[in-house]
Image (spheres, helix red, strand yellow):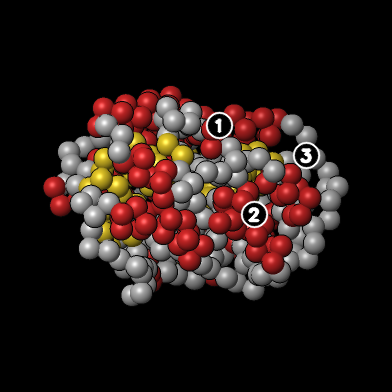
Amino acid sequence: MKLVIFGLTLSSSWGNGHATLWRGLCRALIQQGHRVVFFERDVYYYAAHRDLTELVGGQLHLFSNWDDVVDKARQELSDADVGMITSYCPDGLAATEVLLQSSAKLRTFYDLDTPVTLDCLQAGKPVGYIGPRGLADFDLVLSYTGGRALEELKTQLGARRVAPLYGSVDPEVHRPVAADPQWRCDLSYLGTYAEDRQAALETLFIVPARRLASRRFLIGGAQYPQGFPWTSNIFFVRHVEPSRHPAFYSSSRATLNVTRRAMKEMGYCPSGRLFEAAACGTAIVSDAWEGLDQFFTLDREIVVAQTAEDTIAALERSETELRQIGANARARVLSEHTAAHRARELEAILHSTIAEPRIPETVTASPLATSPTLEV
């Protein structure tokens, strides 16, 4: 199949989780014989931190202005099997209009930020990548989040056919490697600063650091404020690029996963960081959310922590125990959650949808604010 995708970014992993996922998924699709064309607006903050310039085996179109590339978009869609718009695509509305007017066999939307989309909708905030008709005009809506989110995409946004397409990991990129001596620690945390994660981060990371003064803690990420409650045994690495993630995780006895509020409330939304850390064979300590046990077996492949005492207890486990948990998680990911697995799932969903008759519109989506908004 030929897939034409209009997304946030493939070329830069700075400040977003889309790029790493798309790189693995595109690579797997191309290896399985599909043709992938990706359109990305060339914005300054991604250009300044670009860590990929070519989609090997596919095509990456970088453009500064939609008008400069609209004819190319029409041309690529003219013989496409699948046209796809993604959440947070800066030109999502314009690209949707072109897609709906094209002869692409399947018109799809992939929401990699479903909890945020639905949360904004409920709060009356603008959702700049979805038009006033919601998702009613798409033949298929894919969601990074499963569970009740799938039904809400139908009832709130008029989606006709929905299917989950969860995150994944590229094991060629994320795998156990030699530890970096500068990054050796008892517990690490990798993630951009987010206010809605801060309370959980303080409970599960900062409080244990204060109580375990002899232990070493490490945070990697960007946008941490000056007033962040650092302690003398918490060390900081600013923006760990994806190529260095394996070394970051492999240098940790254990690593912490903290889920964004909207994702946690929705459930069934595993972050890419979970699969990355697991693929590196690192023991994961995670906050709890509905559906977590569908991706990892609790206490065998992942440790759940709800209090500071839970984190401390995890760190007091023996090296043998933590390594076994990491090994179990890696085995689970390699058997179920790689980019190749997701590419085959996507292929099956697309073929099935193309083969079925289009579902008529039965739900009229509520009008949405359409002023452009982009949060990274």
Q: Position of residue 25 (x, y in %)?
A: 45, 40
| Residue 282, picture quadrant | top left
Q: Position of residue 22 (x, y in %)?
A: 44, 46
Q: Which residue is mark 2?
A: 99
Front of the two marks 3 and 1? 1
Q: In percent of the image, x 31 and y 54: which residue is there?
A: 211
CA separation, marks 3 and 1? 31 Å
Element under label 1?
A: helix
Q: Residues within 10 Å of mark 3 (few under 14, many from 20)?
A: some
Image mark for residue 358: 3
Decide if residue 295 is on the left or right side of residue 232.
right
Q: Are marks 1 and 2 in contact (CB under 8 Å)?
A: no
Q: Which tag, 3 or 2, sits closer to the chain's start? A: 2
Front of the two marks 3 and 2? 3
Q: Amino acid at mark 1?
A: Gln
Q: Residues within 10 Å of mark 1 (few under 14, many from 20)?
A: few
Q: Amino acid at mark 2?
A: Leu
| Residue 101, picture quadrant | bottom right
Element under label 2?
A: helix
Q: Which tag, 1 or 2, sits closer to the chain's start? A: 2
CA separation, marks 3 and 2? 16 Å
Q: Position of residue 157 (x, y in %)?
A: 74, 54
Front of the two marks 1 and 2? 1
Q: Which residue is mark 1?
A: 294
Q: In percent of the image, x 60 and y 41: which residue is there?
A: 290
Q: In percent of the image, x 67 and y 30: which residue is there?
A: 352
Q: Is residue 58 visible?
A: no
* Closer to us: 1 or 296: 296
